[in-house]
Amino acid sequence: MAEIEGTPLFTGSARGRLLVLDEPISFWGGVDHSNGTITDFRHPQHGETVTDRILAMPSGRGSSSSSSVFAELIRKGVAPNGVILGESDEILVLGAIVGELLYKRICPFLLVTPTDYAGLATGAMISIDNDRLLVERSG
């Protein structure tokens, strides 16, 4: 088991299978808020679902409406269990904060270094615990 320390952008605990995105995604128009599926047909992970996963993204990709879409994913129960970022994204974190305030569901966000981000692999079982990331096993 590997342990990575990061900077919590929104604290909490979560566990799930990791989905590492090759490119940033805009939640406004790029993710279906009713089922958590990546709908941006130009995105390399088009058709994948973020639901119940730990989602790793290099960064966010606008729009400012992404926060409301992220909060809606939380409301409908189709959000990722947690998010790992390579670069901070306050807009997405705002969606998680709103989701917790309105719907009492926590989706933690953890910022990791570029080196640690590069070592993440889709399929690994991941746990986020505030400022720590535990990589339990692959696939």
Image (cartoon, grey):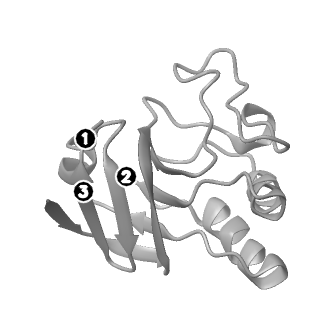
Q: Residue furthest top?
A: 42
SS at mark 1? loop
Q: Are marks 2 and 3 in contact (CB under 8 Å)?
A: no
The CA span between labels 3 and 1 is 8 Å
Q: Is residue 22 left or right of residue 50?
A: left
Measured Cα–Cα span from mark 2 to mark 3: 16 Å
Quadrant for residue 28, please give it: top right
Give the left or right position of residue 94, taking residue 137 as reference: right
Residue corresponding to mark 1: 138
- Amino acid carrying label 1: it is Ser
Instruction: Give me the residue at 42% from left, 57% from top.
Output: 84
The number of discs equals 3
Residue 86: mark:
2
Residue 135 marker = 3
Question: Where does residue 138 sit, x and y in percent of width and height?
Answer: 25, 41
Q: Residues within 10 Å of mark 1 (few under 14, many from 20)?
A: few
